[in-house]
Image: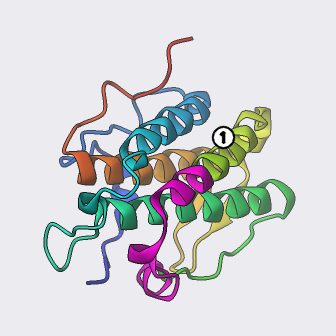
Amino acid sequence: MPDTKDWTWVLERPCAECGLDTQSFPREAVAGMIRVNADAWQDLLAGAGRDDLRRRPSPSVWSALEYGCHVRDVHRLYDKRLALMLTVDGPHYPNWDQDATAVADRYAEQDPATVAAALREAAGALAARFEGVSGDQWQRTGVRSDGARFTVESFARYYIHDPVHHLYDVTGVRPAAHAAPAS
């Protein structure tokens, strides 16, 4: 079932499901949060070959493996979008149909170890790009296909909710505080 919700509300209030408050941490913490989240996905997907990674809790809810594939692809997509925001004035992003991608790329049939490695790589690339953001770059803008406008800062806060929320979807465990590593 396609998710047609407009999740931009997470920029205004904490998520009642996963508990993440996107305004409760400094914007510079997002890179560390990406890495912490990617580590948790590694632990989850390390049970390669476990049947439960492929088992859907219900027909309309993705399996842990499918969520892992989605999170990997979200990291890749947001890395491309962030690169655009940092190099092009006010870019408009094409629509991404996450459900069509899940079917076309056969998320449920992918190898968990391969997904884990690709997720870590994609998360690392995006975290590094966010670490490179400074000063006025946080105020650069981009526009989603539905017209939602983001600054790099609001984009970072909106984005981090996705992998955090999906880890919660799979584990049922809310993130501790903002899930950023201690400095």
Location of residue 38 in the rendering, given as x and y in whole percent from the top left corner: 50, 41
Q: Answer left or right for 144 relative to 5.
A: right
Up-down relation of residue 144 to residue 119 (above or below): below
Up-down relation of residue 125 to residue 43 (above or below): below
Residue at image location 57% in from the left, 80% down from the top: 145
Residue at image location 69% in from the left, 75% down from the top: 92
Colour pattern:
rainbow
In front of the other: 4 or 1: 1
Q: Which residue is under mark 1?
A: 127
Count the numbered circles shown: 1
What residue range appears in magenta?
98-119
Q: Answer left or right for 1 relative to 148.
A: left
Q: Answer left or right for 25 relative to 14.
A: right
In front of the other: 22 or 164: 164
* Residue 17 among those drawn in magenta: no
Residue at image location 25% in from the left, 84% down from the top: 1
User: Residue 176 occupies which quadrant of the picture?
Assistant: top left
Location of residue 111 in the rendering, given as x and y in whole percent from the top left corner: 49, 65
**Can you see residue 127?**
yes
Location of residue 25 in the rendering, given as x and y in whole percent from the top left corner: 46, 27
Q: Farthest front residue?
A: 49
Up-down relation of residue 4 to residue 176 (above or below): below
Indicate the quadrant containing the C terminus: top left, top right, bottom left or bottom right: top right
